Amino acid sequence: MSAAPLVGYSSSGSEEEAEAAARPRPRTGGSSRDHSPLTSQRLPVPDSVLRMFLGTEEEPEDDSEKHGGRLRTFPHERGNWATHVYVPYEAREEFLELLDMLLPHAQTYVPRLVRMEAFHLSLSQSVVLRHHWILPFVQTLKDRMASFQRFFFTANRVKIYTNQEKTRTFVGLEVTSGHAQFLDLVSEVDRVMEEFDLTTFYQDPSFHISLAWCVGDARLQLEAQCLQELQELVDEFEDSELLLRVLAQQVRCKSGNKFFSVPLK
């Protein structure tokens, strides 16, 4: 069975542009030309000119082939910024060595699995923020996190996850100690989300570090025997107990292509 769903996130559009230019300007009174019969008669625009502008305002392209087959959780719109709150995990050399053992073994069951480009533990779903709300959102998040202390957590249980739509599968390491501290963080992040009328996090979340992912629902192939073998590799890895005990030092917010760090005390 899959645990709490995991939602992908991706940067979306940039700022709203040219809205003022698109608005008709108010007429200024007083000019005699406003009442001229010449200006009151509008000549028809030739068809050849009208055809010049057909298709120039296209919807943003959402080509899944350009990003590994992933599909957006929500449509791209100008001025919308995909936003995600998480605890970053800075992978050490020994962690990457462990991953170099786990991934090839998992690929014997699901060859299309690929390594994650970066590692983190989610504190929110991926939500949409309008550009002008990004800085107020981040400031509110900082205010909520001001009293939180750094804490240690351990993530050493292999688990298989899917996103909400079952279009992607993830191999992850689940948090086995420090769960209560993550719940406290999520509680505050949820309050920020509610202030901005955004979706809160999942009920009974399973905090984890995703290691690898693939397109589609691959739980059937990865759970049971493969999962047991991956867990044995983790348990037998040298100093895995120390390696997978991590100090959470900051919360990070990614909105579009912008990153904001919120240090813990």
Image (spheres, rainbow, N blue to C red):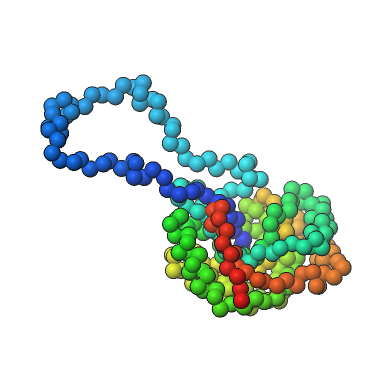
Say which quadrant the N terminus sits in: bottom right
Seen in the picture, residue 264 relative to 69 is either above or below; the reply is: below
Determine if residue 106 is in view: no
- Please tell me which residue is depicted at 48% across the width and 59% down the height of the picture: 134
- Please tell me which residue is depicted at 65% across the width and 76% down the height of the picture: 150
State the image quarter where residue 232 is shown.
Answer: bottom right
Left or right of 223: which side holds 50? left
Tell me residue 33's x, y (percent). 15, 31
Q: How many marks?
A: 0
Say which quadrant the C terminus sits in: bottom right
Determine if residue 141 is in view: yes
- Please tell me which residue is depicted at 15% across the width and 40% down the height of the picture: 29
Left or right of 39: which side holds 95? right
Seen in the picture, residue 107 relative to 24 is either above or below; the reply is: below
Tell me residue 244's x, y (percent). 77, 69
Tell me residue 9's x, y (percent). 58, 55
Tell me residue 231's x, y (percent). 81, 66
- Please tell me which residue is depicted at 60% across the width and 43% down the height of the picture: 64
State the image quarter where residue 239 is shown.
Answer: bottom right
